[in-house]
Image (cartoon, rainbow, N blue to C red):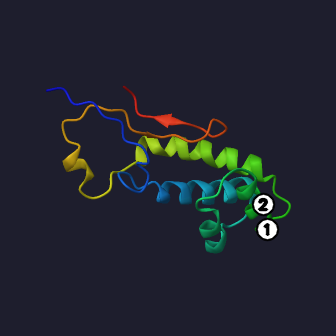
Amino acid sequence: MKKTCVIFDMDGLMFDTQCIYDRAFHDILLRDYGLELPDALRLAMMGRSGDDLYQTINRFFPGIDAPEYVRRSFAAVADRVRDELVSCPGCANRASGWVWPAGVTAPSWRATCASPA
């Protein structure tokens, strides 16, 4: 019997991507702006998007072009996902034998990455 399924909301359930996001946002802030990413900002950015995310960033760093910083950071996330994405404990065993592309997708204004077919 052929099994067909689609799994949504894999982030945190099947894949641990938070560390990738944290490193990408930290590295872009340091490389492009010469600033360290404070833990308070890292935590405040979680779960936010669009204008809410930009306003959160600008509360910590008023002079930064927040949309550009986010764009660069998401591009870095997409690059890292290819090499650094790991499944959560137990997920790989349950998914063994499945043939499926894995990746991190986001709204169209963000970079999107998927594994090669």
User: Is 32 positioned to the left or the right of 2 in the image?
Assistant: right
Residue most extreme to the bottom = 40
Left/right of residue 16 with respect to residue 25 in the rendered view: left
The amino acid marked with disc number 2 is Gln
- Relative to 4, does residue 57 appear above or below in the rendering? below
The residue at 73%/53% (across/down) is: 32
Q: Quadrant of the C terminus?
A: top left
Residue at x 41%, y 57% (from the top left corner): 12
* The N terminus: image quadrant: top left
In front: 117, or 53?
Answer: 53
Total count of labels: 2
Q: Quadrant of residue 2?
A: top left
* Residue at the spot 64% in from the left edge and 62% down from the top edge: 45
Residue at 62% in and 56% down:
25
Amino acid found under the numbered disc labelled 1: Arg
Residue hosting label 1: 59
Circle 1 packing at 10 Å, graded few (<14), some (14-19), many (20+), is few
Q: Considering the numbered disc 1 on the image, is that residue within a helix, a strand or a loop?
A: helix
Q: Residue furthest left?
A: 1
Q: What percent of the width, then of the height, locates residue 65?
A: 81, 52
Q: Is residue 82 above or below residue 10?
A: above
Residue 110 in the image: x percent, y percent? 63, 40
Residue 32 marker: none
Q: Nearer the viewer, residue 99 or 1?
A: 1
**Labelled pair 2, 1 in contact (Cβ < 8 Å):** yes
Q: Position of residue 5 (x, y in %)?
A: 31, 34
Q: CA distance from mark 2 to mark 1?
A: 6 Å
Relative to the observer, which residue lies in front, 7 or 114?
7
Residue bearing the label numbered 2: 55
Q: Secondary structure at mark 2?
A: helix
State the image coordinates of residue 53 (x, y, percent, origin top left): 70, 57
